[in-house]
Amino acid sequence: MTTTVLPDRRQRRRLETIEEIVGVAVEVMSEQGVGGLSLGEVARRMGIRPPSLYVYFDSKAAVYDAVFTRGWRSVDDVMEPVYADVNGAADLTGFLLRAGSVYLRWTIEHPVYAQLMNWRPVPGYEPSEEAYAAAVGTLDAGLVAFARLVERGLLREGLTAERLLTAWTVLLTGVMTQQLANAPQESFEHGRFTSTLPELVSMYAVHYGRTAPSTKGRR
Amino acid sequence: MTTTVLPDRRQRRRLETIEEIVGVAVEVMSEQGVGGLSLGEVARRMGIRPPSLYVYFDSKAAVYDAVFTRGWRSVDDVMEPVYADVNGAADLTGFLLRAGSVYLRWTIEHPVYAQLMNWRPVPGYEPSEEAYAAAVGTLDAGLVAFARLVERGLLREGLTAERLLTAWTVLLTGVMTQQLANAPQESFEHGRFTSTLPELVSMYAVHYGRTAPSTKGRR
DNA sequence: GTCTATATGACGATAGAC
DNA sequence: GTCTATCGTCATATAGAC
């Protein structure tokens, strides 16, 4: 009884350790910079020796891959309820405002993840094929949502969903990059760049929406 | 005669060496990543020993500062003729298209500079006050140009030049970041993100311009 | 202004005992 | 799965001779 340990329990423990490593790694990156991750420092904070980390990750790049993948999965999680509403959204502006807010808030509150996912802050590292697939998946979900907006007649016809989404992501990436690079300590609510979102949404909606979203003059 | 070396000549030689160091440093960064700069590698390529570099730069951060400063000065140089035309520009769209093209082309053709200037790719480095002043100067020149556009009636009144410029830089930063992070090898002309510039300019001009820029229907 | 020599310290990763 | 020991490499920066 005391000697028989279920394999499941072992496995669970192992997964917990992996998650702890990832969490501590993100913590180190938030203090030292994304490119300043050191496995020695991670081990030190966990109270173990550096070689023990290699039981769970083959290399430092594998740790970055884990952070990269978890980042995109986490974005999936916060965007999913937003995209689920794409059929019920009354107007384009409201939908984009919500989608943009949720995404941007996530990036401001997870700056380490956002930088690793959207910039190239780590010399010599680029995501593995598997890790990259997570990013593609998130983009695909966005594509589906935008295609639905076109179908519903909220977005201009004659343009591909890809093109509409590209312009949209350019806007969001611009806000995120400016905010994280120039005023990273500001909150999502009070950020000098994040607070331009409503105006950018309006700009986007006027240009790419099927009808002007809040025009009084109809004939 | 042979023994008397003019101080001017010494000084000139010294400045040349400094520029060579900066140039080789940028070369190394373009191969190893912006955060992967190594002074040993710079010395190796110059055929000198690492300690000799410290005659010209006090620290590695000073080299980064030099690159950072030269980057903004170089942007000043390419933008100056564009801004000089702000009084002669016929329409908003044309002016913004030219300004955006010149700026974005520069960032795509100087990716190392652009990343150092606009992202935070180097753990532990942030620009010194003097270096930062160069960035502020470039921004100020943009502010002056945008204020002039407001005065000339090409941009909407009732908004500060700051706000108009912020929205504009968000657009450009979004394009730059997406292009450099996701498809850095593509040229300015054929980049999948840089090629959206005309559309973004149109979007911006419709929203922030005083009159719709290319509307056929007038009554 | 260049060099040699060195201080000083990290880092990622592996071998192999327990 | 943890450890000790270590390999091999590289880094920034300084002291002091020439």
Image (tube, coloured by chain):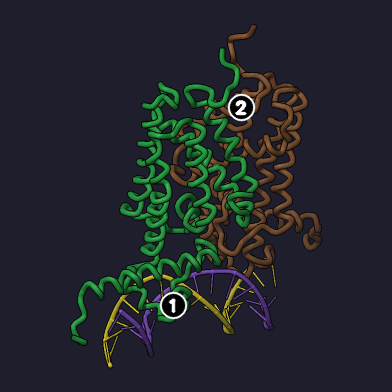
Chain colours: A brown, B green, C purple, D yellow
Where is residue B191 drawn, in percent x and y? 63, 49
Q: Quadrant of residue A160?
A: top right
Q: Which residue is mark 1?
A: B46
Where is residue B86 drawn, in percent x and y? 40, 36
Look at the numbered disc 2 and give the secondary structure of its residue.
Answer: helix
**In this picture, is B186 found above or below B57?**
above
Q: Quadrant of the N terminus of chain A?
A: bottom right
**In this picture, is A68 found above or below B155?**
below
> A161 left or right of A51?
right
Closer to the camera in the image, B91 or A63? B91
Q: Residue at x 39, y 27 (%)?
A: B150
Look at the numbered disc 1 and give the secondary structure of its residue.
Answer: helix
Closer to the camera in the image, A43 or B91? B91
Closer to the camera in the image, A11 or B124? B124
Q: Are marks 1 and 2 in contact (CB under 8 Å)?
A: no
Q: Quadrant of residue B11?
A: bottom left
The amino acid on which the numbered mark 1 sits, given as a three-letter code, is Met
> A3 left or right of B135?
right
Tag on residue A207? 2
Q: Crowding near pointer 2: few (<14 within 10 Å), some, many (20+)?
A: many
Q: Quadrant of the C terminus of chain A?
A: top right
Q: Is residue A172 visible?
A: no
**Residue at the far top in the pictured view:** A219
Q: Residue at x 35, y 41 (%)?
A: B140
Give the CA separation, mark 1 to mark 2: 53 Å
Where is residue A36 drawn, in percent x and y? 51, 60
Looking at the rendered structure, whether the residues under marks 1 and 2 are on a common chain is answered as: no
The amino acid on which the numbered mark 2 sits, given as a three-letter code, is His
